[in-house]
Amino acid sequence: MVSADRRITVTKPSLPPMEEYVKEIEGIWANKWLTNMGPKHLELEEKLKEYLDVENISLFVNGHAALENAIAAFDFERGSEVITTPFTFPSTTHAIVRNNLVPVFCDIKKDDYTIDESKIEPLITDKTCAIIPVHVYGNICNVEEIERIAKKHNLKVIYDSAHAFGERYKGVGVGQFGDASMFSFHATKVFNTIEGGCITTKDAGLIKRLSMLKNFGIEGPETIDYIGGNAKMNEFSAAMGICNLRHVEDNIRERKAITERYIERLGHIKGIHFNKTRDDQTYNYAYMPVLFDPAESGTTRDRVFERLQEENIGSRKYFYPLVSDYGCYKNDYDSKDTPVAKYVSDNILTIPIYPGLSIADVDDICDVIEEEIKHANR
Ligand code: T4K
């Protein structure tokens, strides 16, 4: 069991060896260039283009700012509707609303928790301007069907790929799908720049608009054609990204080993379900979501959460409540309209996964869960 002085958190940031980072930032003292698209920023852009297998990239101060600015760059008519998922971090929905657009929630699928593409078309009206799906937990959406629907109805598709860093679908970087994709480089993600994020797109014109939107609309020293804000990534963050990129493959391998151990230990237990990933995708093992079906398992997600907490093991109810149940949205939406999302949100728990989490720790976590289920079924 986990001792009182040992606390396991749901995640921990990946950091390079300190000397490696110190070496990486030495040049910043020499050139005195701290931000505004400096050499580290440009170097990280080039490296990420290759790693993510994308044509164009624009770095941002964080993933949310990247998404908000990407939506702004399309200049949708105020009050237009955006079809999206309620099973996500608030960022996705807030980015839509903060652009004066109206989210329309579509239900999700029970096996991979991504937007249910078969339920999108009935939600389309003459006000719909875009679809914003989420590759939740790194599970890649049905990008082909979403593209078909978007083309048919002349809609833009902006993927929230916050969780899908480095993944490929049918051998193609996931950031190539749709009109744009946002990746988050937050401390808690598979790859981090402390805080950070990016937009990837095939559209070089979009990258140009984004470069202005994230830098006060500045096109040239005396030319301001856009009303932009400030959302640039600084050089220290970019340097962290350059270092972390060198280790990301090893980190993903560690995450994979942890995931496999969880499945080995818990996979046979009735009422425990793991999410499905698509056959043709590579997976980054960003999260370890476990769904506890109350009828089958005899226990509840909340009870498992409490038991883990009692043992000093952190877990998170990502993503509960559903966005449509948040105080700021619940008067305008009814989560009963998205019953699968409601069921998943009520019963899912993400349990610890991060490079450095030992297999012995994983076994301790599994013991607690196994014991709870045995106890509930006694
Ligand atoms: N879209 C989606 C689908 C997203 O999931 C997110 C972010 C975004 C958009 C927006 O991207 P960013 O603007 O964030 O780049 C965390 C992250 O802050 C957030 O980035 C992430 N999704 C979300 C799923 O998780 P919290 O509020 O749960 O984080 P917090 O502070 O409770 O940390 C979680 C655990 O991580 C803690 O138990 C301890 C550990 N931790 C955290 C930090 C910050 C550390 O060990 N060290 C740290 O420095 O949101």
Image: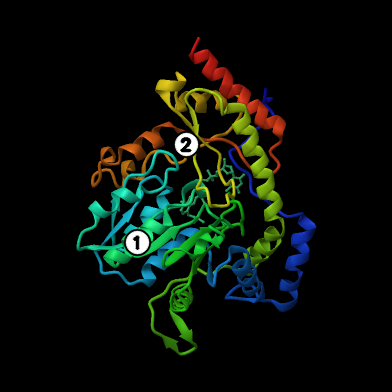
Q: Nearer the viewer, residue 224 or 290?
A: 290
Q: Residue at x 54, y 72 (%)?
A: 55
Q: Is residue 169 visible?
A: yes
Q: How is the image coloured?
A: rainbow
State left or right for residue 345 relative to residue 269.
left
Mark 1 or mark 2, whichever is nearer to me? 1
Q: What residue is drawn where x is 75% and y is 73%? A: 27
Q: Is mark 2 within 8 Å of ligand 1?
A: no
Residue at label 2? Answer: 317
Type of the residue with mark 2:
Lys
Q: Is residue 353 left or right of residue 270?
A: right
Count of labels in the image = 2
Query: Could you classify mark 2 by the number of other residues whose Cα lies within 10 Å: few (under 14), some (14-19), or many (20 or more)?
Result: some
Is 60 in front, or is 110?
A: 110
Where is residue 326? Give x, y as percent. Answer: 34, 43
Tell me which amino acid carries mark 1. Answer: Arg
Q: Residues within 10 Å of mark 1 (few under 14, many from 20)?
A: few
Choose the circle earlier in sequence order: 1 or 2: 1
Determine if residue 95 is in view: no
Q: Residue at the top extreme?
A: 378
Q: CA distance from mark 1 to mark 2?
A: 33 Å
Can you name the residue that lies furthest to the left here? 126
Q: Residue furthest bottom?
A: 222
Which of the numbered marks, if any, corresponds to residue 189?
none
Q: Which mark is residue 148?
A: 1
Indicate the position of residue 91 as horizontal and vertical percent values: 42, 53
Compared to residue 190, the image places residue 45 above or below, namely below
